Image: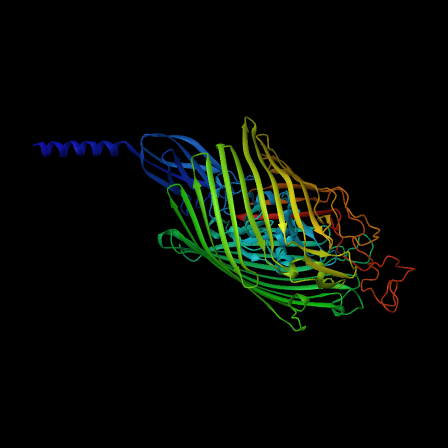
Amino acid sequence: MRTTVSFLIACFLTNSAFAQQGKISGTVTGNGKAIIAATVVLKPLGSTVMTDSTGHFHITNVPFGNYIIEISAVNFTGYASTLSVKGNISLLNISLTEANSIMGEVVVSGTMKPVSKMDSPIPVEVYSPTYFKKNPSPNIFESLQMVNGVQPQLNCNVCNTGDIHINGMEGPYTMILIDGMPIVSSLSTVYGLAGIPNSMVKRVEVVKGPASTLYGSEAVGGLINIITKDAAGSDKVRVDLSATSVGEYNADVTAKFKLDKKISSLLGINYFNYQQLRDINKDNFTDVTLQNRISVFNKWSFKHKSNLQSSLALRYVNENRWGGELQWKPEFKGTDSVYGESINTNRVELISTVALSANVTADISYNYHLQDSYYGRIKYYASQQVAFAQLRWNKTWGRHDVLMGIPFRYTFYDDNSPATADVNGSNKPAHAWLPGIFVQDQFTVNEKLTTLLGLRYDYNNEHGSIVTPRLSFKFASNKNNTFRLSAGNGFRVVNLFTEDHAALTGAREVVIASALKPEKSWNVNLNYTGFVTHKKGYVGIDASVFYTRFSNKIVADFITEPNKIIYDNLRGYAISRGVTLNTDFSFTNGIKIIAGATWMDVFSMDKDANGVKTKVPQLFAPKISGTFAVSYSMKKAGLAFDLTGKVNGPMYLPVVPNDYRPEKSPLYSIINFQLTKTFKKGFELYGGIKNLFNFLPADPLLHPDDPFDRPGGKYFDSNGAARPDTNPHGYVFDPSYNYAPVQGAKGFIGIRWFIR
């Protein structure tokens, strides 16, 4: 009898428990389509699920009570709302707003896994395609000029080669990643960025300061991670066609398709063409290189056992560009008849991420880059291959979130310059092997304090063992205010091509004074991120104070001998320090303002043979700079107005002794305006003016009327010595004096069309 009563009581309690549990179901959408892999969290219960391929989610066994449901997704503003569960709640239709904020929502670059920006212990800036559309550009290189503290720098006024500076440090200190892998490096940092179409960009993440603990060599000054779209979250078809008043034509077309429920693909094609000879400053040189470029990108997504996701992407880029004297033709390649710089680039990339299990992921990438070029009479022929493989393992134990990785990178590099010449003058291609291992532990001390400790060991076949540690603290007083303190070490192995493009212009002889050592840096960064909401909108603030000290810095001496570039390690040290501030104002009346400013002081302290220190300012590093984007939308009329701009303060430029050109550029700004009209059925028409006030730099070329420095010519006698009557200061042709595009104001117009 007692057993029967106990059994009946147990059944009653069990049924009562089931009666007090509910279920939550819903759909998450954005821009009119389902959002895949959105994160849904039910607090304080802690239940976390992801939306499926149709945007649906289900949370079962929810005890009756009051909760907060939070939803976050890449490129969308987060959602939070109270929810009372007293039974089954189904068909919650939640629509997220596309993020148009510098604050972003989800980041991966700081910890190699998706986390919200506010939860990341590493300060990461996030930029969505919506932000870059405020000032549309044909490639990601030009778009990055809208990022505060990031400067796309043109290093040659003839061929328009460029690199990316972060916080005033030269391009070789910036690591460029595609989907977290070191695809863009060495040779491709010069021309590879122009071939990345904006149509394939899902978002761009920027980390300022060393990130070598996770990413290895080249991540000394910072990194830019270009994350590409996949088929699951893309439109069926998207077309973007544009043209400018100076004859630039750009076409972006993407389309997705499915083979079955588990395999889908996204195909993107970009074509850019510019063939007009323009010479605004009347120096008989093209103001902008003529270009003909095509890029094809194909990304495949695979879903396999246990809903694990893998991807495979292929990209091919072919570009022909030339700049020089207006009368130049292809038959003048390699001759001293008419000066021109002609570059043909062929590039193939493969990127793959394979989820081996819920905790183990394999990353694989390979790229082949071939450059066939002429700089005046000098032929430069180079090939590079980079193979990368990495095994990542992530596991959470209580309050510890541990990430371990075994990366391996192999780089083959060969050219016909002194960079790959043996001591006897014969060709010696470079083979760089860089195996390593890293471990990172993110420890949640409590709800407010999180620490991150990382350590990496690499072995370079030429430079030996390299150790890079990192330590970070994140303190969040509440969900809207976060402080981060980060310190870390960075390193970079030597690759001469990336040191200075001027080595290839043909105007100077390359001299390597001694065996170059790998560069090292130590960085400290204090960051504050905060949100303030009010009745008419919100304000976002992201501010940082940074300090980086470099040792073994490789410097190029342009001054000792005008016709030479002398490379050597700095005998002293170099400093990059400053303050950066990003702000984001959004109002319910349709006005949105994104503005940022940076103050920095970048210099080197060199020692001469007597040990006397000399402060040398960094070239192309303005002490003050800023960016802004002011937008106003009239939703009922389908109109959007965007005013964007970049401000650069004076910066030191590569002048020669007794140069008639100023050693510092003036304070200037480039302002752009755009008007966008949105129609029904996925059509958008946009147009505007770039460089609204027609700013032009002065005297970009030195001696453009004698680019070959001909003996017996206007400026040099028959022995090659400078003539005292026409060239008393010994000037030679130099195209490296650049601080702004030589293009002036131009109009643009474009149309976008998409099918969801």
Residue 696 in the figure: left or right of residue 514: right
Please name the residue shown 59% across and 42% down the image.
131
Residue 723: image location, x then y, percent: 89, 62
What residue lies at 53% left-to-right and 35% top-to-bottom? 483
Instruction: Choose between 520 and 366: the one closer to the eye.
Output: 520
Identify the residue at the far front of this view. Answer: 610
Residue 123 visible somewhere in the drawing = no
State the scheme by which the image is colored: rainbow
**Observer-nearest residue: 568 or 430?**
568
Can see residue 743? yes
Residue 348, position as x, y percentages in the image: 56, 63
| Number of marks | 0
Establish if 671 lies above or below 238.
above
Q: Is residue 614 above or below residue 708?
A: above
In the visual, does 199 lie left or right of 617?
left
Q: Nearer the viewer, residue 218 or 114?
A: 218
The residue depicted at 49 percent of the width and 53 percent of the height is 456
**Left/right of residue 50 with respect to residue 706 in the rendered view:** left
User: Relative to 1, is 321 on the left or the right?
Assistant: right
- Point out residue 5 in the picture as x, y percentages from the top left corner: 11, 31
Q: Outermost residue, top direction?
A: 535
Q: Residue furthest left?
A: 1
Q: Quadrant of residue 134?
A: top right
| Residue at far right of view | 725
In what quadrant of the picture does the N terminus appear? top left
Residue 716 versus residue 54 in the image, above or below = below
Q: Position of residue 605 (x, y in %)?
A: 70, 48
